[in-house]
Image (tube, grey):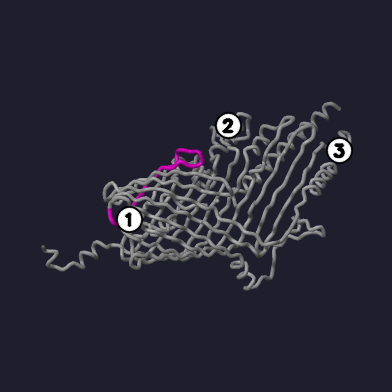
Amino acid sequence: MKTLTKTIKANYRIKIMRIKILFLFIIVAGGGYVMGQQSNMLYFMDGVPQSYLVNPATQPSCDLFIGIPAVSPVQVFVESSSFSVSDVMWQDGDSTRLFFNTVEFQQDFLKNLAKSNFISTDVSTNIISFGFKSGDLYITYDLTERFSFRFSYPGDLFKFVFEGNERGDEFDMSNIGVEAVGFLEFATGVSHKINDQITLGYRGKILFGHANISTRKMDLKLITDLDWTVRSKFDLNATLPAIDIPTDSAGDFQFGDIDTQENLNASDYFKMATGNKGLAVDLGIHYRPIDKLTLAASLLDVGFIRWRNNTYNITQDVEYIYEGMDLDVANIDSTVFENFADSLKNTFVFNNKQQPYTSFLGAKLYVGGKYQIIEEISVGLLSRTEIFKGRIREQLTLSANFYPFKEIAASINYSIMNNTFNNFGFGISFKPGPFNLYFISDNVPLTFAVEESSGVPIPYKSRTLNFRFGFNLVFGCDKEKTKMKDQPLIRSIL
């Protein structure tokens, strides 16, 4: 009997550990699939027409540009604040090691975590992008599809899973949060050169929200004593087009009966695409106190979306005390665990409302300066501050910009971000004739691992991966040549 009891206890501990790991995997992996910022290098890189996207005061060097639809530009940004792939798995001889294989590996992994951590993704593509110069003004128009996701999680979540608990421990999970949004952005911008020293710019945006998940409040704590106490209080808003989440007679969600809406017509799709409207603005300034020095500042994505269609307001406010389960080792069956699962289901109910709500974009502040060393070389320093739900994140980028020929512009940069100091970026822009092609990455991976079955290279030591590329038609760029053509012949001889 003692052997049987020990076996059951051992199996029970294994099951609990597996449940913890599964719970952790679902949260983190779910965050990875479902991140937002513009490229820092783009701020001072001449030769790229869309550089006004990071400072609306910037005027492209060509009198007219037309972006090729869907590829001007395309941006992909992926970021993990606390770990890279190499912190999770690595090759050891012929074996693949995982971070939870041993206690030593787990402790090394936990050292990377802060009190609050995040995984984020941002993807955008311009459907329409063009601009033209008119006197001292430069006017731009953009139609952009944007999707961003951010999942935040506390370091205590991993500590609970891997270090276990002792009597009197308290784990604060309140930093868990989700922010996902997809929307269409129509923007028009104007850059106005006031004089030789000051240029001002703004971009007004009309937003059409498609889908959204936003955690407004989260208070989740686990207290371990003789009994375990779970306190869960949160407020989550969601807009899920073509998704129906039914409720029971008490008004509680029935997540097991989620269904998709069928037989939608053209007006339904139009309503889903345009029914959730918002506004935003970008502001920027360039100031040249002396001939070779340009100081710049910009404030981006100050705005909101008002969600009205297919909205769900999900709230929970419960306290659950887990006193253990009574197990009869001589007659154990699945009903014990089923009853326990039903108890959890009946306790952790989700209350439902379907009311309009407002979500805000994550504002970003850029402040920097560029110094023109010689005509072909300049250097820049840029600070980027992101304000997201009361939290402030800072990045610092140093760049060197080269213009060896009128057809080529290139930049290299070094950034401090996500508590790492190994972020090197590269960008290049070509302009053969009326064509402009560019590629930019703020973080070019220096080391890769190859996935054996597919042969795909993986930047396994990078916490940040981003790139942007674009293709434009450009006109009126060779101003010096045009200016010489306009000079009288006798004046050229003299």
Q: Nearer the viewer, residue 52 or 291?
A: 291
The percent coordinates of residue 396 (x first, y second) are 44, 43
Q: How many marks?
A: 3
The percent coordinates of residue 403 (x first, y second) are 30, 51
Near mark 3 (Cα within 10 A), the count class, few <14, some 14-19 or many ≥20, is few
Can you tell which of label 2 and label 1 is closer to the viewer? 1
Give the position of the N terminus as an image quadrant: top right
The percent coordinates of residue 47 (x first, y second) are 35, 56
Tag 2 near tag 1, CB within 8 Å: no
Amino acid type of disc 2?
Answer: Asp
- Secondary element type, mark 2: helix
Q: Is residue 396 magenta?
A: no
Q: Main secondary structure of the magenta part?
A: strand
Residue on which the image places disc 3:
332
33 relative to 437 in the view: left or right: right
Dot label at residue 108: 2
